[in-house]
Image: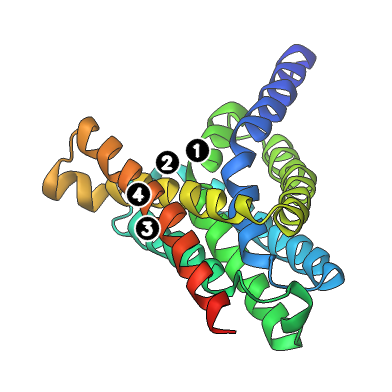
Amino acid sequence: MPLGHLVYGVFSIVFIDLLLAGDNALVIAMAVRSLAPRERRIGTICGAAGAVVLRVGLTFIAAKLLDLPFLKLVGGAFVLWIAVKVLFDASDAPDAVAAPKRLAQAIWYVMFADLTMSVDNIIAIAGTSNGHIELIVFGLALSIPFVVLSANLLANLMDRYPFTIYLGAGILGRVAGNMILTDSFVTRKWRPSTTLEYVVEGVLFLLLMVGGKILCDRRKCRR
């Protein structure tokens, strides 16, 4: 590969990773928030690394990924479930549920959610790399430190400022709505308009953020 193309590819992939890491970092932070700090770091790193390994293989069939029916639909539903689950756990102290089973569960959540949310990232890197395996591996491996660092910062922020949990749940609701409505099966079957997408995303954002706050307040009152 010519040096100029290599340098351009590297910078393009770094930019793509920075641009698209935000939503992935948020869903990972929400998934591991209920773990103790040490298990949280382990869960984040292992989950993100496992997702990247899977991404490397999937990148080679990236052109077909966006056409797979139900992929983004299932992923969006799973992201929505994570947001609701975190809201139910929000009244529990993070150190209270650090059992090994919970750690393994969090790693699985991180891997599945990160993978289903990374279709756009995979497509972008596959296109930028022009099929060069070294650039594909570089781009996907580079996403690990970006996502891990961001996820840990977000999880710590949620510990310190509880209102960010509700904001994060609302954002995940918006992400889930977008994933569901842009699934290939949904678009072919119902052809949702852009306006409908905005409305659904907005409703899910408010429902999870406001409803989550009310739910958590009620649970705390029962303690």
Q: In this view, does 51 lie to the left or right of 185?
A: right
For marks 2 and 4, the one nearer the N-term is 2
Q: In this view, does 85 lie above or below 44?
A: below
Mark 3 packing: few (<14 Cα in 10 Å), some, or many (20+)?
Answer: some
SS class, disc 2 = helix
User: Disc 3 or 4, which lies upstream in sequence?
Assistant: 3
Q: Which comes before the other along the chain, label 1 or label 4? A: 1
Q: Are marks 1 and 2 in contact (CB under 8 Å)?
A: yes
Q: In which quarter of the image is the N terminus?
A: top right
The CA span between labels 3 and 4 is 14 Å
Q: Name the residue under label 1.
A: 123
Q: Name the residue under label 3.
A: 71
**Which percent across, then down, holds residue 206?**
38, 48
Frontmost of labels 3 and 2 is 3
Viewer-side residue, 185 vs 44: 44
Going 72% across and 56% down the picture, which residue do you hit? 155
Amino acid type, label 4: Gly
3D distance between C-alphas at marks 3 and 1: 14 Å
